[in-house]
Structures are given as structure tokens and as C-alpha cells.
Image (spheres, rainbow, N blue to C red):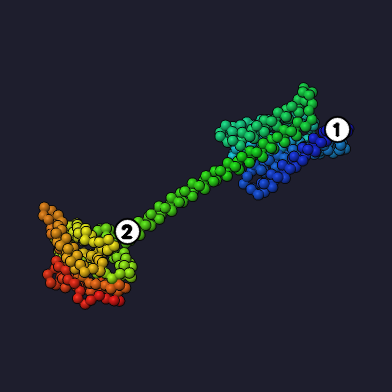
Amino acid sequence: MAVPLQVQLIEAFGAGVYALTLASHADLWWRRREQRSHAWLALSAFGALLVNLTGAAIRVAPAAYATALLGLNMLGVAVALISLYELAEAIGGKRPGRLARAMEAATLVPILLLPVLPHAVLLAALYLTGVLFLLAAMFRAARHARSGDPESHVIALGLTFLFTTLLYDILSEMQVLVRVEGMPVLGFTVLYLAAARALSLRYEREHRELLELRGKLETRVQQRTTELEAANQRLEQLSRTDALTGLANRRCFVEAAAAYLRASPARLLMIDIDHFKRINDTHGHETGDAALRAVADALGQGLRSGELLARWGGEEFIALLEDADDASARAERMRAAVAATCVQCGDAALRLSASFGLARVARGGALDAAIARADEALYRAKREGRDRVVTDTAGSDAG
């Protein structure tokens, strides 16, 4: 029987759509195998292509091949419908349950019984199962859409359109409706376009979410970096600061003094609190700590901008003053400030004093040598009765 040209063109168009869908989504799945949606879309297109080709072949093939071609045709129907259900679940990010798996297996049963049961009965069973499967796919896609998955909404619309075209084709075959050629091809074409759109929307959404996540991660990394830098700065500050008095520590002083002396001469002052061990032993370490803080405050008030003061260790302090004629007078004022300082010890006030050793350091002079000379002057102050300033008379050390 001659096949009308219109039907041939529709079938050729359908075969092209199915083949293109199969090839493109098989390639996409091969590149992104974690994306099950591409695999099920390719399998559905394969099933539709098989139905298309075997349907055309049945009309022209010898009767001896009719059963085999019908079996392949039914297999194509089963593969297409099963794949559509799997596609609806995959788009929604789910996997079919046990009941769905049982329905998938049941769809294949009529094909296995083809050699022993009447074809009309088996076709009716297959189409009934197929209708149920398609309805189930529509229901699952709609449920995923209601759960907040926008891509499933697009798939649900595509499946609904396919179901409508297939139902129209069946009713027209039963002469209930006017025959319109190519309704199944139209339904599958629209469905595959809808599926492609749904996957495109999915990738766009995932890309946006990835950009948002990257932005959040970059922000968190920046915050952590800022916090780490601040913590490192605090650690650096702590490593250069005496925790008790808040003054610079020995390491910080040595670095700063070396830089100062590279540019200018200076006066180096060594200070030692008098009778500090007796204060600690008699009045306790809390009183000793209070004495250290009080002396640090008194000494700090006598500094000028750019000058250095540090706790050298124990009850010793060190200062680097500008090289000026009034350095000895300034040291004396600092001594007097300490002598005027008291710390509370119970109900009594404990008066403090300190001994000072002063030495001049030339520009570029050796800091260690200057410290040794100032220290010697300090111990002379101790030997001479404490609470006084003694100046080194050996002259500045030029390094």
C-alpha cells in the first residue's frame, strides 16, 4: 500500500528530530556522566526513533518479518516511556522507587509474550501500561514542580502536551476525532524542546548558585585572611611588647634603636628600680608588678616624640633619648618623677626610687658597647647610694 507523501515527510522529520536529540544528548551525557537527565533523554529519543523506523518498515516489509518488527516497535514504545519517567525523576533530583521499577519491568512483559499471545491483546496491554507510565511521569514532574523545582514545571508541561497528542492520535485511530497526521511526532518534538529548555534552565541556575557560592567563599576567605592578618599583627605586637607594663620589650627596642642610631646620635639611659627584690620579697609580687607599672608610667612622661623606652628585663628599663645638651637634666627629672611615685601596699604608700646610668652614642655607634657603658654607669649609681643619675665619662662609642 502506497504511503502518502505527507506521511513520509512527517516520519522523516520525526526521525531527524529523534536522531538529533539522541546524538546531542548522548554526547552531553558522555561529557557529563553525572547528569542522568541527558542519558534518559537520549534513550527516550532512541525509543521514539525505533518506533518511527519500525513503523515505516512494517508497512513495506514482507509478512515473515512482521512479528520481529512489531517486537522492535513495542520495545521502542517501552524504552521511550520508561525513559520519560526516569527523565521526570532525574530532573527533579530523585530516583524511582520499587513500585516504579516494577512498572518498568511490567512494560517489557508484553514484548516477551509476543510469540505466544495474540498481538492485539499484547498491544492493548502495552498501550495501557504506557498510558499509566506517562501519567505517572506527569504526576511526578508536577509534584517536583510543586516542591519548588522550576525545571520540573517545564517538563510537566512537555509531558502533558505529549500525552494530549498521543491521546488525540489514539482517538483519531478509533475514528472518534478527525485524523491529523503527525500528532505523536509533534508531541515528542515539543517534549524534547521542553526538556532541552529545562536542562538549560537547570545549568543557568546551577551556574548562578555556583557564582553565589564562589562569592560567599571568596568573602569568607577574605574575612578569614583579614582576621588572620589581624591576629598576626596582634601576635607581632605581643612579641614586641612587654605584657606587664605595655612598653616595648628588649627585641623591639634593639631593632628600633639600631634604626635610630643609623641616622642620628643619641643618649642611652639604663634604669634600675632600687631595692626591687626586697619589695617583691616583703610585699609580694602584686606590689612588685604595680611598682613596675608605676615606674614605666613615670618614665614615659619624660619622653619626647621619637624617643624610645622599653622594659629591658626584670626591674630594668632602657631609654634612648635625643642627643641634646640637656640630656643629663632630663634624666634627673625622670629620676625625680620616679622618686615622687608611690604604690599602695595595704594601708601604707610605698615610695619608689631608681638608679640611672647615662651614656652617649655616636651616629652609627655600636649599641652593645653603649649599653655596656650605660650599665657600668648605672652600677656606679648603685654603689654610690642609689636614687641618682651617673653619666658615663668614657665618651661616645663610634662603633
Residue visible at 30% across and 74% down?
A: 365
What x and y, as percent, mark residue 235? 35, 58
Nearer the camera: disc 2 or disc 1: 2
Mark 1, other Cα within 10 Å: few <14 / some 14–19 / many ≥20: few
At mark 2, the secondary structure is helix
Q: Amino acid at mark 2?
A: Leu
Q: What's the residue type where badge 1 is placed?
A: Pro
Q: Residue at x 12, y 56 (%)?
A: 349
Counting from the top left corner in percent of width and height, residue 394 is at 21, 77
In front of the other: 126 or 372:
372
* Of the image marks 2 and 1, the number of the one nearer the N terminus: 1
Q: Position of residue 288 (x, y in %)?
A: 18, 59
- In the displayed orientation, state which residue is furthest to the front: 325
State the residue in front, 12 or 39: 12
Please report the residue visible at 74 percent of the width from the left and 43 percent of the height from the top: 20
**78 over 351 or under it: above or below:** above
Q: Quadrant of the C terminus?
A: bottom left
Quadrant, the N terminus: top right
Check disc 2 and report the residue beneath it.
Answer: 238
Q: Would you place residue 70 above or below residue 256 in this image?
A: above
Q: Quadrant of residue 3?
A: top right
304 sits to left or right of 92: left
Hey, which residue is sitting farthest left in the picture? 348
Camera-side residue: 52 or 310?
310
Q: Could you tell me how far apart the alpha carbons at marks 2 and 1 are, in whole angstroms? A: 93 Å
> Which residue is tagged 1?
4
Judge the density around disc 2: few (<14), some (14-19), many (≥20) Cα neighbours within 10 Å: some
- SS for callout 1: loop
